[in-house]
Structures are given as structure tokens and as C-alpha cells.
Amino acid sequence: MLEDTMEREIRNLLEQIHAEMRAAGEQVQAPASMEALETLHDYAGRDLLAVLPEAYVDFLRQADGLDFNGTVIYATRQRALPGGLTLLGFPESNRDFRGAEPRHHVLFGETGDEFYAHDQSEGTWLRLDRAALSPLETYPTCEAMLADALRRAFET
């Protein structure tokens, strides 16, 4: 029941954000294609040894990424947007984050100074300080993390 409530909240917040973006003349991302989602699943399993959470996949089925008020939820791949902007992608952001270092976080989004992540060793969902990688907030589920990210972006 709590999951259903979170899913509705995510859907409602995303609709409100998209309405604001359209009103401002900004581009709203189309839903991710099945092919893009399959490629993303393959990348996550092969390169990150991770399973994509259904909440994130559901988000991508509504919008293949989001960049709003300084909050980014990663798209299935990085791509150029009108006006010289770049929409950050899940594979590229995780590849850059990990570099040559072994890391136990999988990133799903960011703000200027924070990451939204899953700690694979602890199994927790987090908002992390970007510089120190210390937890700023812990969430019970991916849905709760995404809902908070969207809520914070919308309220900014």
C-alpha cells in the first residue's frame, strides 16, 4: 500500500514538474523505449552488478530522464538537449563516478552537491554529500528516494 502511494506521488510530482517545464518552454523527455531499457538493464547487471529497481524503471517509462531546478534523475543514456545543455545518463554518470576506483554506490540522480544512490553493500537508499560521500538522508525504498528528489526539486 505504501508503495502504491509513493508511485502515485512520483507520478503526480512528475506531472506537475512537466507542466511547469512546458509553461517555461522547456523540453520534457519522452518515455524511454523498450530497447533503451533493455540496454540499461544489461549495463547495470554486467558493469555494476546491480539490478535496476522497478521504481526507477517505472520513472523512465514516464520520462527518459529529468533535469529540473538543479535536480537530475538520470536518463537511459546521456544526450544533448536544445540550448547546448546535456541530459546526464545513468551509464555515463556511474562510469565517471566509479572511474578506476571500486565503489559500492550506484547513482540514480544528483543535484549540484548531492547524489541519489543505492549503497550495494548496505542495501540502503541514500542522499549523499557529493564531496564526502557521507549520507545526508536514508530512505526505506527507491520509491521514497525518487519521491523526495522530485519533491525537493519541485519545492525549489
Image (tube, rainbow, N blue to C red):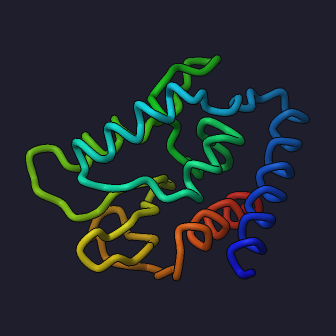
Nearest the eye: 90 or 61: 61
Q: Is residue 114 visible?
A: no
**Where, by quadrant of the figure, is residue 145 drawn?**
bottom right
**Where, by quadrant of the figure, is residue 124 drawn?**
bottom left
Asked whether, in this view, residue 52 is left or right of residue 82, the answer is left
Q: Is residue 132 above or below residue 18?
A: below
Q: Is residue 77 visible?
A: yes
Classify the position of the C terminus by image quarter.
bottom right
Q: Is residue 95 above or below residue 106?
A: above
> Residue at 22% across / 64% down in the picture?
104
In percent of width and height, residue 122 lies at 28, 79
Nearest the eye: 155 or 77: 77
- How many marks overall? 0
> Residue at 43% across / 53% down in the picture?
52
Classify the position of the N terminus by image quarter.
bottom right
Nearest the eye: 124 or 127: 124
**Where, by quadrant of the figure, is residue 129 drawn?**
bottom left
In percent of width and height, residue 72 lies at 55, 47
In percent of width and height, residue 81 lies at 59, 21
In percent of width and height, residue 115 lies at 42, 60
> Residue at 64% across / 49% down in the picture?
59
> Residue at 60% across / 63% down in the picture?
146
Asked whether, in this view, residue 118 is left or right of residue 18, the answer is left
